Amino acid sequence: MKADIGLIGLAVMGQNLALNIARKGYSVAVYNRTAERTKKFVDDRVKSEKIIPTYSIEDFVDSLEKPRKIVLMVKAGQPVDDMIDELLPHLERGDLIIDGGNSHYADTDRRIRELEKEGILYLGMGVSGGEYGALHGPSLMPGGTKQAYQLVEKILLDIAAKTENGPCCTYVGDGSAGHFVKMVHNGIEYSIMQSIAEVYDVMRKALKLSSEQIGEIFEDWNRGELSSFLMEISFKIMNWKDEETSKPLVELILDKAEQKGTGKWSTQVALDLGVPAFSMAASVFARVVSYYKEERQKLSKRYEPAVKRDGSVEVEELRRALSLAYFLSYSQGIWLIHEASKSFNYGVDLLEVLRIWKGGCIIRSKMLDFLRSLLKNSPENVTFLDDEEARKFVEERLPSAIKVSNFARSCGIATPALNACLDYLFSLISENLPANLIQAQRDFFGAHTFQRIDRPGTFHVEWQTLE
Ligand code: NBP
């Protein structure tokens, strides 16, 4: 009996994905570079599932039904290339490798090109939902050739999370589309996480609410339009007590945020493609600055007296501000995917992307239904803003968002993501921006020329006399 599919990489994601696939009735051959991990996995977690442990690449490949389907769940970067190099001598034309890690999309394009020459099919597949999602149903974002997708479509649809709109998996598009969409998913995730964290900061520092009180508020918000995975875990975190001290654990966690790169990559490509992903960038910088703990500690002593609090905000105003930040975070992400799809010929169906984010994934939220309805009305409305329903939504939340931003500033509380969301919005809804002055400055010092609003053409002025 040969296995239906193989999986390499038995860290948290790989173990849970293998179990998920096996629990859907498929046989799965597994392999991990370090054999002890495979043994431990089989001993500790495999019960009646059809999971076949293997301890050499030869045995692994040999145990697979042809054409072979192999999922890589190893660390992104060089390990993926290493595994491909190890596999390649043992594979045959028509076999398929699926990279389920968070690979950079450019690496995926390169690997597709290289493997095409060998006749090996390749899918770059975003997997969202963390270890729980991997086990119980993730959101899957596979991209590559349709032919490659069709080889594993049934398995992927079976293991994906399910919502009333179907399984959270679709063929995302050509080339590296799947990894690109997953990367931007993470960019949106950064922005929403940072926005929630900033609202939390205002609540604890300015409103003097306890973690338990904030937990209650978040739990309440999670019943309404902010209903989302990130809101849900946030209220659970607020209520979590440290076993040793009985204090809320969140208060004992060092405020230095780590990152693995997907938010940075999203921001970098947003710059390359010319998409103003304000709050994605701000959220990456917020993590960066969090790392300067010692400097912050020192400077906070020097500058504390300079801050003068002005008024207050209601909890409901914070809720509205956060709701607007969610909306605008998705707006930036979908716009970015749209531009990439055009530039890289991905052929992404944005409505499908919003649909497969509804379940299993980290950025699943009730708001996605609203966003889908906006995009259904007008497929070109990739920012979601060009719509009467969207205008009403924004207008109802904007005064609160402005008030929260101003209030936080008056308290000396940094809210970079919330502010960046507002700046993104204000920039987009302003007929006139001060870019006229920028153009004049550029022309002044560099003869870069400018256009005029009152006549066509390109102009340059001798702003200064050069002796
Ligand atoms: P890690 O990203 O921590 O990777 C650990 C796995 O990679 C182990 O199986 C390890 O084998 C293997 N590996 C390494 Br490291 N170098 C290797 C090499 N040169 N050759 C072969 N195998 C190698 O695991 P993870 O957190 O389960 O994530 C797997 C992928 O899924 C990553 O790309 C990650 O970004 C992505 N992802 C993670 C999450 C999450 O919530 N953790 C969510 C979504 C996507 P070893 O046992 O021999 O060291």
Image (tube, rainbow, N blue to C red):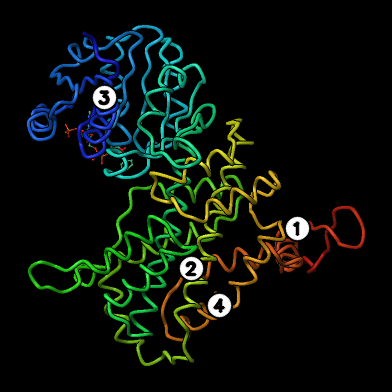
Secondary structure of the residue carrying numbered label 1: loop
Cα gap from disc 2 to disc 1, whole angstroms: 44 Å
Image quadrant where residue 348 sits: top right
Give the image location of residue 174, x and y in percent.
54, 27
Quarter of the picture holding the N terminus: top left
| Residue depth check, mark 4 versus mark 1: number of the one nearer the observer | 4
| Residue depth check, mark 3 versus mark 1: number of the one nearer the observer | 3
The residue where tag 2 is placed is 322
Cα gap from disc 3 to disc 4, whole angstroms: 49 Å
| Residue depth check, mark 2 versus mark 1: number of the one nearer the observer | 2
The residue where tag 3 is placed is 7
Left or right for 357, reference 270: left
The residue where tag 4 is placed is 400
Sequence-first tag of 3 and 4: 3
Cα gap from disc 4 to disc 1, whole angstroms: 43 Å
Left or right for 380, reference 194: right
Residue nearest the observer in this picture, 340 or 376: 376
Left or right for 351, reference 256: right
* Disc 2: CA contacts within 10 A as few (<14), some (14-19) or many (>=20): many
**Measured along the vertical axis of the image, is residue 156 above or below residue 380?**
above
User: Are the residues at dot 2 and dot 4 in contact (C-beta closer than 8 Å)?
Assistant: no
The residue where tag 1 is placed is 447
